[in-house]
């Protein structure tokens, strides 16, 4: 395969390492498996131009993206539109989509796994035609992201600590919104503190991400406003993957979901794959089964 790699030196953990050295190791790893690889190292403000050029290139079979979660989502959008295969270098904070694909989180181990990986078709979601790989969230998670981003972070660990601090503030003062939620044409009005619509249902026994997303459905998770102690219990269950035992979290599935924010004076912030989106009153959310080609490593027990 002809690989075109784009490394965002300002994104995720790449801004804390020697990116030039990592690029050399990446090239060696892929060439050892017989692939041709071209690598570009770009600044954050050069990312979109770099993605656009690769998407238009007839030579590139795979767009291998490295950076934060925003970098990966943007790369996925371009791959989806240009019918190219996406490769995910897990250099984000939580790397939830990389976890869904079964990728090692260590960059060197991920390089080895990606160089031997095969293209596989997986599901993606869209929110108002914007692609998402993990989820769209309303309520508590966007508030946590907004509070976290108001702080300064020089490393991945500082960002995680900042997220924990923001989460504690949010659990003590949870947001509350009157929202019209429509699942496959069935609408209801609810007062909610948390909504997450995910690309396939979360897997059990781990952090909230889908196991390999190929089931062709949206996961829909909602919770009403809760006291601080119950919010902490809910967060713990989500992290541990035991939310199905939590009576305060409602889990459903759908092919299409519409969110309408009916309070004119209190429009909630939204995150799409962790990126804040503001001032939109309605979201049409859809699942697109097996619409994106992604490099997925073979299971550990595979003999290929």
Image: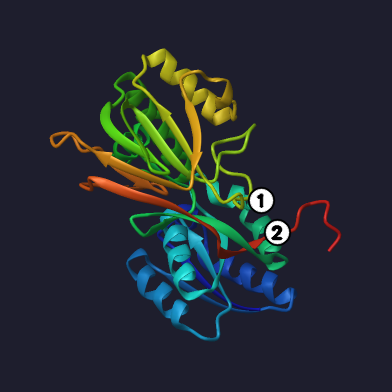
Please report the residue visible at 50 percent of the width from the left and 31 percent of the height from the top: 251
**At which x and y percent is residue 223?**
40, 25
Question: In the displayed structure, does residue 279 sit left or right of residue 7?
Answer: left
Secondary structure beneath dot 1 equals: loop
The reply to whether residue 154 is in sight is no
Q: Residue furthest left?
A: 265
Please report the residue visible at 43 percent of the width from the left and 44 percent of the height from the top: 184
Q: Nearer the viewer, residue 247 or 300?
A: 247
| Quarter of the figure with residue 265 | top left
Residue under circle 1?
102
Q: Is the residue 87 above or below the residue 68 in the image?
A: below
Q: Is the residue 229 above or below the residue 253 in the image?
A: above
Q: Residue furthest right?
A: 303
**At which x and y percent is residue 273?**
42, 49
Q: Nearer the viewer, residue 128 or 65?
A: 128
User: What quarter of the picture does the N terminus occupy?
Assistant: bottom right
**At which x and y percent is residue 36?**
64, 81
Q: Is the residue 223 above or below the residue 40 in the image?
A: above
> How many numbered discs sit on the rendered protein?
2
Label at residue 85: none
| Quarter of the figure with residue 206 | top right
Secondary structure beneath dot 2 equals: loop
Question: In the displayed structure, does residue 279 sit left or right of residue 31?
Answer: left
Label at residue 297: 2
Please report the residue visible at 37 percent of the width from the left and 35 percent of the height from the top: 141
Q: Are marks 1 and 2 in contact (CB under 8 Å)?
A: yes
| Quarter of the figure with residue 34 | bottom right
Q: Nearer the viewer, residue 94 or 133?
A: 133
**At which x and y percent is residue 198?**
48, 44
């Amino acid at each position: 395969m002809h690989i075109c790699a784009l490394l965002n030196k300002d994104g995720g953990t790449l801004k804390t390492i020697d990116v030039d050295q990592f690029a050399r190791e990446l090239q060696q790893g892929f060439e050892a498996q017989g692939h041709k690889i071209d690598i570009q190292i770009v600044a954050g403000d050069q990312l979109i131009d770099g993605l656009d050029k690769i998407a238009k290139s007839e030579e590139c079979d795979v767009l291998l993206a490295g950076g934060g979660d925003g970098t990966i989502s943007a790369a996925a959008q371009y791959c989806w539109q240009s019918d190219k295969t996406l490769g995910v270098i897990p250099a984000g904070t939580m790397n939830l989509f990389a976890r869904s694909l079964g990728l090692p989180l260590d960059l060197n181990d991920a390089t080895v796994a990606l160089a031997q990986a095969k293209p596989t078709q997986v599901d993606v979601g869209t929110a108002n035609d914007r692609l998402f790989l993990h989820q769209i969230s309303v309520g508590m998670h966007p508030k946590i992201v907004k509070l976290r981003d108001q702080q300064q972070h020089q490393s991945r660990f500082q960002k995680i600590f900042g997220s924990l601090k923001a989460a504690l503030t949010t659990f003590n003062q949870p947001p509350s919104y009157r929202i019209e939620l429509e699942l496959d044409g069935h609408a209801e009005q609810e007062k909610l503190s948390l909504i997450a619509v995910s690309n396939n249902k979360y897997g059990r026994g781990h952090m909230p991400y889908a196991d390999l997303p190929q089931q062709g459905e949206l996961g829909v998770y909602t919770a009403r406003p809760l006291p601080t102690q119950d919010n902490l219990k809910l967060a713990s269950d989500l992290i541990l993957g035991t939310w199905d035992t939590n009576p305060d979290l409602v889990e459903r599935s759908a092919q299409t979901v519409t969110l309408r924010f009916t309070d004119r004076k209190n429009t909630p912030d939204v995150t799409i794959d962790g990126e804040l989106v503001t001032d939109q009153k309605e979201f049409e959310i859809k699942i697109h089964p097996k619409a994106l080609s992604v490099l997925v490593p073979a299971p550990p027990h595979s003999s290929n």
